[in-house]
Every structure is written in structure tokens, then in C-alpha cells.
Image (cartoon, helix red, strand yellow):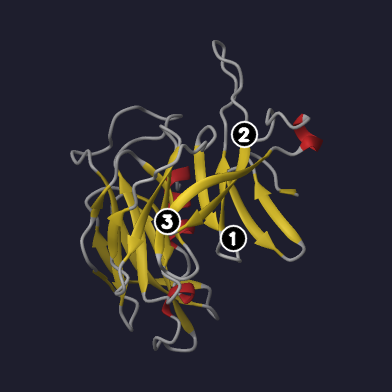
Amino acid sequence: MLNRRELTAMLGALPGSALLGGNAWAAETIPFYASAGPNLMLYRLDVAAASLTLAGSITLPANVQYAWPHPSGKILYVAASNSQPGSGPMGTAGADKNHYALAFKVGADGQLAPHGERRLLPVRPLHISTDHTGSFLFIAYNVPSQVTVHKLNADGSIGSLVEQTGRIDFGIYAHQIRATPGNQTLTLCSRGNDATATKPEDPGHIEVLSFKNGQLANLQSIAPSSISGGTGIGFGPRHLEVVLGGIQVRPNAVDIAA
């Protein structure tokens, strides 16, 4: 049975149809990427037969945490780390204690090849995504709660870190960072933490950030009043998706349309 990390990695790696764009695949099959630990695997998904056939695999230096496609569909960005989530066993799951952002070029057959320089990250990354022009790469971390920004080079490889000049509130337990359709703001799901026997609950929020030339700034902090009176207590957003007519938030247990 898949654990939460393996399932998240499988979902985060995305169906390959979101990646390949005009690349040539048989009409009856599409590429599908999944991961288990440090192994990132390519499957051929036969839609008619509802079956997966392994077509290749690459091994990363650490466990896959999340993956995201370049807007062109020709590059896949992967965040990797052997560190364990705060709710699980502490320490690392392997000998490599580094944290990485890596880029892979997507071949016409869906196979992945390393692309450009791998980038070391400060701590375990939870989520990785790009802006809609493919100019910047955003990475969210939970401990400490933060977001880093890297420039993306013209060829899609990962460029230098954009040092932030302002003080930014990332909330408690940053979990997902996404560019909005207008590509001028970001939404950051800050999950908060459940109460324990020795510690009260940490509030959850959706932070709205502006970005210009890679520089981030706080615009708004949202905690639905229908749940918590605007305090963020009882609201634990993990992921957010723009849907027709509004925004859908996935908190700890149920979907809430806001």
C-alpha cells in the first residue's frame, strides 16, 4: 500500500499528457510519471485498457517530494529530499542529507534526461511550481515556513536564487505555492498545525503574495470567517486550485469552496 508521501509524489508528478504538448505518442497511450522513494518512473497509460506499462526509470539523489512541468511541457522540475515530515519519524531516510531542485528534459518518447545544474535547497521542500511564463521557479518549505525563488534560464534550466529584499510573512507550515492565472500574484497555502497536549493549535491561512522580477511581498491573508471567525483556527488548507466560478481549497479532511 502506498503511504501518503508516495501517493503525493505520484499525484505531484502529473500525467505526462500535461507535459509533452506536441511530442509524439501513440493516440491510445499517454505518458504517466510516478515515484517511489528516489525512483521516478515513466509508465505508458493505455486509456482504453486502463493499464500502466513501465517504460523507464531514473534514480534521483534523494526521495521525490513533488514535481511540476514547465509551461512549454518540455521540462519537468522535481523537488527531492530524504528528510521526513514533521508528523513522521525524524531524521533522514537515506545517506544523502541534501535537499534538491532538479530539472529534467522530457524527450519525444517521454523519457527524462537531466537538464542543467541541480540546485541545493536550504531545507526539505514540500512543493514546487513555476509562473505561467516559465521565468521563475517557486519552492515552498514547511520548517521553517518559507518560499524561495529561482530564476529559470532561457533553456528552462534552473538558474540562480533570487535573494529577497523584503520581510515576508509566509504563515505557519507553508504547503503549496501557485501562480494565479494573471501571473502577477501567488497563492500560498499555509496549513497551520493541530493542537497537541502541550501546544495550542497554530492557525492556517491562504497568503496572497505579489511577485515582480522574482521579489515577493505580502498582499492579503485569508482565513474563511465561516469556519473560524477570521482567526485561522480550524482552517488547515493544504492545496488550492482555481476552478470555474471561484477557488477550491483542499484542507486536512474535506473540500471547501470559497
Mark 3 secondary-structure assignment: loop
Mark 1 secondary-structure assignment: loop
Identify the mark nearer the N-term, 2 or 1. Answer: 1
Q: Amino acid at mark 2?
A: Gly
Q: Amino acid at mark 1?
A: Thr
Q: CA distance from mark 2 to mark 1?
A: 20 Å
Q: Nearer the viewer, residue 35 or 86?
A: 86
Identify the mark nearer the N-term, 1 or 3. Answer: 1
Q: Which residue is mark 2?
A: 204
Q: Residue at 63% of width from left, 57% of height from top? A: 241
Residue ranking furthest to the top? 198
Q: Residue at 36% of width from left, 35% of height from top? A: 84
Q: Is residue 58 above or below residue 228?
A: below
Q: Is residue 256 above or below residue 28?
A: above
Q: Nearer the viewer, residue 4 or 113?
A: 113
Q: Nearer the viewer, residue 217 or 231?
A: 217
Identify the mark nearer the N-term, 3 or 2. Answer: 2
Residue ranking furthest to the right? 226
Mark 2 secondary-structure assignment: loop
Picture coordinates of residue 167, whole percent (x, y): 46, 37
Q: Which residue is mark 1?
A: 180
Q: Which residue is mark 3?
A: 214
Left or right of 207: which side holds 72?
A: left
